[in-house]
């Protein structure tokens, strides 16, 4: 026992070497404990000795174990190595040894559940029901299994019949004891569209299994609606509201939907009568803060197409009652939007202004009252929603200044009167500060926006909306460290890496903060690994008889497994690793190992259209609430820099791109990774070119060219189309820069292909083609360098461009490095004049690349050396903000942060220079 | 103007406007699945008219004999939806499920002793302090175990306050 304790302790302390040692010592001829074998396998697995570990676990796993501890550890092992299917064999061995033990028979069944082998599930559940009929749940396991087969193979008509018959039999025998069991029956009836029967079941004795009356009634109402029994449905929903839940909005909607359907069938919906009922509901509330009966007035008015004026009056009336609650905005948003979107007679500009003015008149006049600031927040959020904070509405800059200053002064006044927010709460006027920042940001006044946000954050430190806004603003300003500070404050965890990781990944990439990005990927990977344990909980659902959650959990598991974010992360993580390894440890052996460690499935499968349809976009786009009309506020770019430089498949700006575009982006990055890897890892045993001093890769060049062609095709989706024969266009702004750089990516790899195909000898026309290639790149670099040296200020967009250039040049130097091994050296004895000329051209090109890198770096350095003047990128800043806003500190700290970001980028340039020295050592032959 | 329904796995992707608030913990996946796979009716979520999550409740049923009860593991409301009675509504759902489905004697919850705002809120919902658990929160802070009796506890025995504090090891969780 002591031996085992020590082994467990060593494993827990992640001291795997010691764990292996302890296991080896413990395993003697006398004591050949299988548990210790499994534990040693786990320790070896952690040490990276995967094959050895699998062999050892396999050697003991299928002996027919009964100890839970042994089976659990075997389960952990196989789950970790992705061989969960072996657990079926483990359980089968135990069952074979102890056939009368139901737990082992159940174990076999559940092991098939975990790997979703429905056919085997069916076979084993038949055995279970036959051999252990006394176990109540086995019949329901059978039923769920049948439905799982139906769902996985919808054409299986016999199976659904079988499920239906079995359910009927169980019903007749009075076997249904809980709503969870009834849920399976419901699923069968719904699948067969037997809604009449479903209704009878729910209204009968079985329906009573739903002990909470409203749950049953909601289902009944929904079935009645499906059956077009709208009158009955309306009564059911009404019953829920009047008897049980006066604030249950889904039932109000169910009720109104039913009334509307009745109307469609000929009977006019009686507005007065419906309103009368709504009023009745209102008067029955006894001053409870229940909102539904009041907003129901608006819903009825909307559905009965009442006039704009009536709707506006109701919105104002609702404001009188609930205008001091932050939720007011969300309650009326739908109705205001409906007035804006009216096909005919939509709200005019003047009507919008009148609405805002009349709402303002309804706010408390007591400037020290907490209620006033909440009311103002609602009014001005609506003002933004209706588009009155757009440029064309606030034509004059003075109007903007006045608005911003009014909001901030109001906020400060109220804060002084009421005091700072409670540590656990938001300050009620925070939204006014966020609105002020939005208005400033819309106009490119980013530093002022940051100042305003920092002020609000100092008052209301726990409001994460400030952090979200600051991440974006500091990102645009290029203040990386301050952006990262705010990312840390969000404390993104676990599943959030999948759903809101998009808020940070691309920002970090664009800013070249690779250490932080690396950590983020690492944490995300841990979450994706967590999902490997999800099948265990499907099995738990069977054991706990929580049948309603079985298919739901499986669906969730698929959403995570096929997550777009996960796919994008895996590609980006590998590209990032390559970048870091190239820059930090460019030794040949390290590089080669890095390339070899990349799992082929990360890049080998291009996303076909079919596959992209199976990708799940789990991003939570609603978390950053900007109250914009249609979420796409019209803005005026302060400069051409508003256009983002597209970098990765995780673009923050690109989150609103359509799914097809995102899939194409992912495909593009995948192919780049594939091209990089394939030029490295397919090393032949001997050099191809006689006399060549180094060993180089020998990929299938036909396939390689096809991949390049595919890359060209994808880039054309984004209109990145230029040919090597085209002279690089003049770069006037970041959009041109992006165009020039992105269009040239395939050329990097085409250059490599050309070299590979003409390594032995080269004729005049081919040599000229090489010259054309090299000339194209030189012109491109000339143009990019010229453009970089015209930059007069630095911000997040330019930082993004620098970092993108660094990534591009890293790929370039990598391909040149591989090509260099192929082009014969000058000192080679058997000289071919054309090859010699190519070598000369090649060497010259490398020198020119290096020179360009130095020039761009030198210009970037001037920003650091000079007293950084943010006002160059922020021309409208005069810092005319109220005195409560600390402009100096934010200005200084932002400047410092931008300097740090420049320093970080300069460090990447330093390592790039080293790469261009071509100090590659000979790689070892595999 | 709130719709309450059972919490579903997919809600885990969209509860960020609630969970980014610093008082709400985002747990590991198995934590949520443990609850979902054991007590599916004890988890509920509230949504506004636009389908935006407003708050949610995680609970479970536990205990033996007269200690069989519903337990509030987490009840949380997004900042913008506070002070409209939503926590009360979610608590009532759990109480109803504890009573109707699980036939428990009482519902209980643990709250930081320093969180007077929450304590007062629970008192308003009918909960009383049953006992103090010393150093319950990582040994740093005491917890108050608050309870509300359900119909099954006719004599309201479950909520008679203990005269002395207890240690976490004494708590039958």
Image (tube, rainbow, N blue to C red):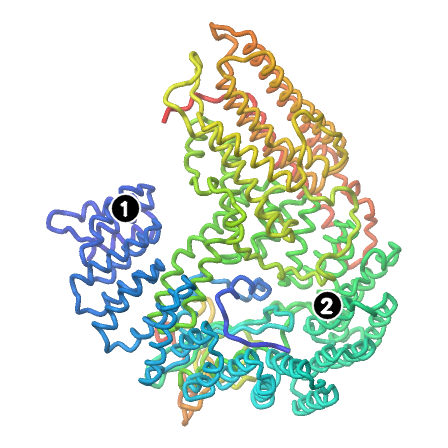
Q: Position of residue A870 (x, y in %)?
A: 76, 42
| SS class, disc 2 | loop
Would you identify the image quadrant in which residue A350 lies?
bottom right
**Residue that carries the numbered disc 1 in the rendered image:** A54
A314 or A674, nearer to the observer: A674
Q: Which mark is residue A539?
A: none
**Quadrant showing the C terminus of chain A:** top left
**Quadrant showing the N terminus of chain A:** bottom left
**Numbered circles on residues, count:** 2
A474 or A48, nearer to the observer: A48
Query: Mark 1, chain letter?
Result: A
C-alpha separation, residue under disc 1 versus residue under disc 2: 60 Å
For the point 29% across and 78% down, the residue is A136
Q: Position of residue B59 (x, y in %)?
A: 45, 74
Label 1 close to label 2 by CB (< 8 Å): no
B55 or A673, nearer to the observer: A673
**Residue that carries the numbered disc 2 in the rendered image:** A429
Query: Mark 2, chain letter?
Result: A
| SS class, disc 1 | helix
């Amino acid at each position: 026992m002591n031996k085992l304790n020590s082994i467990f302790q060593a494993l827990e302390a992640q001291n795997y070497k010691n764990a292996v040692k302890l296991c080896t010592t413990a395993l003697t001829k006398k004591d050949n404990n299988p548990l210790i074998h499994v534990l040693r396998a786990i320790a070896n697995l952690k040490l990276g000795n995967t094959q050895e570990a699998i062999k050892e676990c396999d050697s003991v796993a299928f002996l027919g174990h009964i100890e839970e501890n042994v089976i659990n550890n075997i389960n952990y092992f196989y789950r970790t190595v992705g061989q969960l299917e072996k657990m079926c064999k483990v359980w089968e061995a135990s069952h074979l040894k102890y056939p009368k033990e139901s737990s082992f028979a159940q174990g076999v069944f559940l092991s098939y559940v975990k790997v979703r082998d429905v056919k085997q599930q069916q076979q084993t559940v038949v055995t279970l029901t036959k051999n252990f009929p006394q176990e109540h749940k086995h019949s329901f396991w059978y039923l769920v299994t049948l439905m799982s087969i139906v769902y996985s193979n919808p054409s299986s008509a016999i199976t659904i019949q079988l499920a239906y018959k079995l359910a009927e039999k169980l019903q007749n025998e009075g076997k249904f004891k809980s709503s969870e069991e009834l849920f399976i029956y419901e699923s069968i009836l719904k699948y067969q569209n037997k809604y009449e029967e479903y209704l009878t079941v729910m209204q009968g004795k079985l329906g009573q299994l739903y002990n909470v009356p409203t749950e049953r009634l909601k289902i009944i109402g929904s079935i009645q609606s499906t059956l077009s029994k709208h009158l009955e449905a309306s009564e059911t929903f009404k019953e829920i509201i009047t008897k049980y839940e006066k604030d249950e909005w889904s039932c109000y909607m169910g009720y109104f939907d039913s009334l509307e359907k009745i109307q469609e069938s000929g009977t006019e919906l009686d507005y007065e009568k419906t309103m009368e009922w709504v009023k009745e509901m209102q008067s029955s509330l006894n001053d409870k803060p229940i909102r539904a009966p009041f907003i129901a007035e608006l819903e009825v008015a909307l559905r009965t197409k009442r006039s704009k004026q009536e709707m506006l009056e109701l919105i104002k009336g609702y404001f009188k009652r609930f205008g001091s609650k932050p939720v007011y905005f969300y309650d009326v948003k739908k109705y205001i939007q409906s007035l804006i979107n009216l096909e005919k007679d939509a709200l005019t500009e003047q009507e919008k202004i009148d609405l805002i003015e009349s709402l303002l008149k309804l706010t408390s006049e007591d400037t020290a009252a907490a209620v006033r600031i909440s009311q103002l927040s609602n009014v001005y959020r609506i003002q933004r929603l209706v588009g009155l904070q757009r440029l064309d509405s606030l034509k004059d800059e003075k109007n903007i200044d006045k608005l911003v200053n009014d909001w901030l002064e109001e906020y400060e006044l109220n804060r002084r009167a009421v005091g700072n927010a409670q540590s656990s709460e938001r300050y009620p006027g925070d939204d006014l500060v966020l609105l002020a920042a939005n208005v400033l940001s819309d106009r490119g006044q980013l530093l002022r926006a940051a100042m305003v946000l920092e002020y609000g954050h100092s008052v209301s430190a726990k409001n994460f909306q400030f952090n979200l806004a600051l991440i974006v603003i500091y990102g645009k300003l290029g203040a990386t460290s301050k952006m990262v500070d705010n990312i840390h404050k969000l404390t993104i965890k676990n599943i959030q890496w999948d759903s809101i990781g998009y808020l940070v990944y691309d920002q970090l990439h664009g800013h070249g903060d690779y250490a932080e990005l690396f950590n983020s990927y690492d944490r995300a990977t841990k979450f994706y690994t967590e999902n490997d344990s999800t099948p265990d909980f499907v099995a738990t659902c069977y054991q706990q008889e929580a049948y309603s959650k079985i298919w739901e959990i499986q669906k969730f598991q698929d959403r995570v497994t096929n997550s777009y974010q996960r796919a994008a992360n895996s590609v980006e993580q590998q590209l990032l690793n390559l970048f870091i390894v190239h820059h930090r440890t460019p030794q040949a052996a390290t590089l080669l190992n890095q390339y070899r460690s990349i799992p082929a499935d990360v890049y080998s499968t291009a996303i076909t259209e079919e596959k992209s349809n199976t990708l799940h976009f789990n991003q939570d786009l609603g978390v950053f609430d900007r109250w914009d009309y249609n979420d796409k506020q019209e803005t005026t770019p302060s400069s051409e820099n508003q256009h983002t430089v597209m970098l990765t498949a995780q673009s923050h700006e690109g989150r609103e791109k359509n799914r097809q575009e995102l899939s194409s982006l992912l495909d593009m990055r995948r192919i780049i990774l594939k091209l990089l890897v394939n030029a490295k890892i397919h090393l032949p045993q001997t050099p191809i070119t006689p006399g060549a001093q180094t060993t180089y890769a020998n990929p299938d060049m036909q396939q390689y060219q096809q991949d390049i062609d595919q890359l060209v095709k994808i880039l054309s989706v984004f209109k990145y189309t230029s040919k090597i024969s085209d002279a690089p266009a003049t770069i006037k702004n970041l959009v041109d820069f992006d165009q020039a750089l992105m269009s040239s990516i395939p050329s990097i790899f085409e250059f490599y292909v050309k070299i590979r195909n003409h390594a032995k000898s080269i004729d005049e026309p081919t040599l000229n083609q090489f010259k054309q290639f090299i000339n194209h790149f030189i012109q491109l670099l000339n143009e990019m360098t010229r453009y970089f040296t015209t930059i007069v200020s630095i911000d997040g967009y330019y930082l993004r461009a620098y970092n993108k250039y660094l990534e591009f040049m890293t790929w370039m130097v990598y391909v040149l490095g591989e090509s260099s091994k192929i082009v014969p050296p000058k000192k080679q004895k058997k000289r071919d004049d054309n090859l010699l000329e190519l070598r000369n051209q090649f060497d010259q090109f490398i020198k020119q690349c290096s020179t360009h890198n130095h020039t761009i770096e030198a210009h970037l350095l001037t920003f650091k050396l000079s007293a950084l003047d943010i006002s160059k990128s922020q021309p409208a800043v005069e810092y005319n903000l109220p005195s409560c806003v600390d402009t100096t500190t934010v200005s200084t700290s932002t400047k410092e942060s931008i300097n740090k970001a420049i320093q970080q980028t300069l460090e990447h340039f330093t390592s790039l220079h080293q790469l261009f020295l071509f100090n590659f050592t000979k790689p070892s032959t595999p | 103007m709130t719709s309450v329904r059972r919490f579903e796995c997919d809600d885990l992707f969209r509860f960020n406007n609630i969970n980014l608030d610093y008082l709400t913990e985002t747990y590991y996946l198995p934590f949520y699945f443990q609850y979902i796979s054991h007590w599916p009716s004890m988890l509920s979520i509230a949504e506004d008219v636009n389908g935006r999550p407003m708050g949610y409740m995680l609970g479970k049923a536990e205990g033996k004999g007269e200690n069989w009860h519903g337990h509030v593991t987490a009840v949380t409301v997004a900042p913008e939806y506070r002070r409209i009675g939503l926590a009360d509504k979610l608590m009532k759902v759990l109480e109803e499920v504890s009573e109707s489905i699980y036939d428990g004697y009482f519902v209980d919850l643990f709250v930081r002793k320093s969180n007077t705002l929450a304590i007062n809120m629970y008192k308003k919902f009918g909960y009383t302090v049953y006992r103090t658990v010393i150093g319950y929160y990582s040994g740093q802070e005491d917890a108050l175990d608050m309870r509300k009796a359900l119909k099954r506890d006719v004599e309201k025995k479950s909520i008679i306050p203990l005269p002395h504090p207890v240690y976490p090891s004494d708590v039958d969780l």
